[in-house]
Image (tube, rainbow, N blue to C red):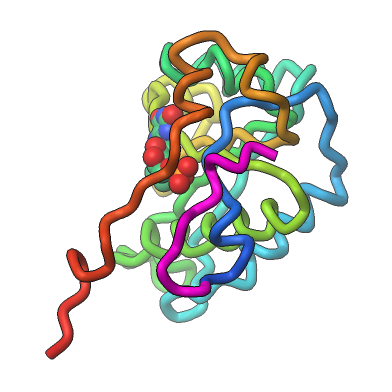
C-alpha cells in the first residue's frame, strides 16, 4: 500500500478514515455488482433531513458505452487517470422534497453525507474512490438526460489500486504526496 497517504492523526480516528484517500492509480481489476451495491447500501444509511434521502447514483462500469459517455465529460485534469477506474459513479442530488415538491435546502448536504459513507465503506473493502467536481456539467446533464430537479454534484472514480508508477506526471507526484489537513484548533471553537 501507498503508506505516504495514511493520515498522521493526533487523535485515534477509525482506520478507514486514516487510510482513505482520493486515489488516481487504478488497476485493471473489475468491480462486481455486489461490491457496487454494497457501497450504495452504505450510502443509503446516511442521515438526511427528514429522512428524504436526496441522493441518486447513476453509474457505469469500464468497458461500456455509458462509462465512456461519463468519462468524456471529465475535464483534462481528471480524464487521463479516471478513465482507468473500474466504475464511474455520478452523485446526483434530488433538489426537492418528494412529498410536496418544495426545495430541500439540505439536498447537497445530505448527498455529501451519503458520499462519505460510500467512500468509507469502499475503503473498508479495499476499493478506492476519487470524487471529482471537474467535469462539464452541462454536457453530463445532457448526456444523462437529467431533469431540472437533478443536480450532478460530482463523479466518483471507483476501483482497485495500482502502483503510482502507472501514472504519468503530474498525477504520479500527486499520488505520492502526503495528505495534509488543518489543525483542529483552526476550525473548532470551544465556547
Ligand atoms: C466535491 C469534490 C470535488 C473534487 N473534485 C476533484 C477534481 O475534480 N479532481 C481531483 O483530482 N480531485 C478532486 N477532489 C478530490 C480532492 O482534491 C481531495 O479530496 C482533497 O485534496 C483531499 O485529499 P484526500 O481525499 O486524498 O484526503 C474533489 C473532492 C470533492 C469532495
Q: Where is residue 79 shown, x and y percent of the image?
A: 52, 16
Q: Where is residue 25 shown, x and y percent of the image?
A: 63, 25
* Horizontal side, residue 11 vs residue 70: left or right: left
Q: Is residue 151 visible?
A: no
Nearer to me, 147 or 152: 152
Residue 92 drawn above or below residue 175:
below
Q: Quadrant of the C terminus?
A: bottom left
Residue 29 drawn above or below residue 3:
above
Nearer to me, 105 or 189: 189
Q: Which residue sits at x=54%, y=40%?
A: 4
* Quadrant observed for ligand 1 in the rendered image: top left
Q: Where is residue 62 shown, x and y percent of the image?
A: 75, 23
Q: Residue 153 lies in what quarter of the image?
A: top left
Q: Is residue 6 magenta?
A: yes
Q: Which residue sits at x=42%, y=43%?
A: 179
Q: Where is residue 156 shown, x and y percent of the image?
A: 56, 38
Q: Which residue sits at x=53%, y=18%?
A: 172
Q: Which residue sits at x=67%, y=52%?
A: 123
* Horizontal side, residue 143 vs residue 160: left or right: left
Q: Main secondary structure of the magenta part?
A: loop
Q: Is residue 67 magenta?
A: no
The extreme left residue here reads 191
Q: Quadrant of the N terminus?
A: top right
Residue 39 drawn above or below residue 15:
above
Q: Is residue 171 visible?
A: yes
| Residue segment shown in magenta | 1-12
Amino acid at each position: 500500500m501507498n503508506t505516504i497517504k495514511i493520515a498522521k492523526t493526533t487523535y485515534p480516528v477509525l482506520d478507514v478514515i486514516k487510510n482513505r484517500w482520493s486515489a488516481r492509480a487504478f488497476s485493471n481489476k473489475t468491480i462486481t455488482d455486489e461490491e457496487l451495491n454494497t457501497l450504495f447500501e452504505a450510502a443509503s444509511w446516511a442521515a438526511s433531513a427528514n429522512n428524504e434521502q436526496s441522493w441518486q447514483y447513476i453509474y457505469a462500469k469500464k468497458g461500456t458505452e455509458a462509462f465512456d459517455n461519463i468519462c468524456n465529460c471529465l475535464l483534462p485534469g481528471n480524464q487521463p487517470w479516471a478513465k482507468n477506474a473500474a466504475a464511474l459513479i455520478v452523485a446526483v442530488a434530488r433538489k426537492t422534497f418528494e412529498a410536496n415538491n418544495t426545495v430541500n435546502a439540505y439536498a447537497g448536504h445530505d448527498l455529501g453525507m451519503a458520499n462519505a459513507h460510500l467512500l468509507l465503506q469502499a475503503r473498508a473493502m479495499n476499493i478506492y474512490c476519487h470524487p471529482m467536481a471537474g467535469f462539464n456539467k452541462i454536457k453530463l446533464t445532457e448526456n444523462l438526460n437529467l431533469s431540472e430537479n437533478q443536480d450532478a454534484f460530482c463523479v466518483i472514480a471507483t476501483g482497485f489500486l495500482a502502483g503510482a508508477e502507472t501514472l504519468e506526471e503530474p498525477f504520479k507526484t500527486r499520488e505520492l504526496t502526503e495528505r495534509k489537513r488543518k489543525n483542529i484548533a483552526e476550525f473548532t471553537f470551544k465556547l
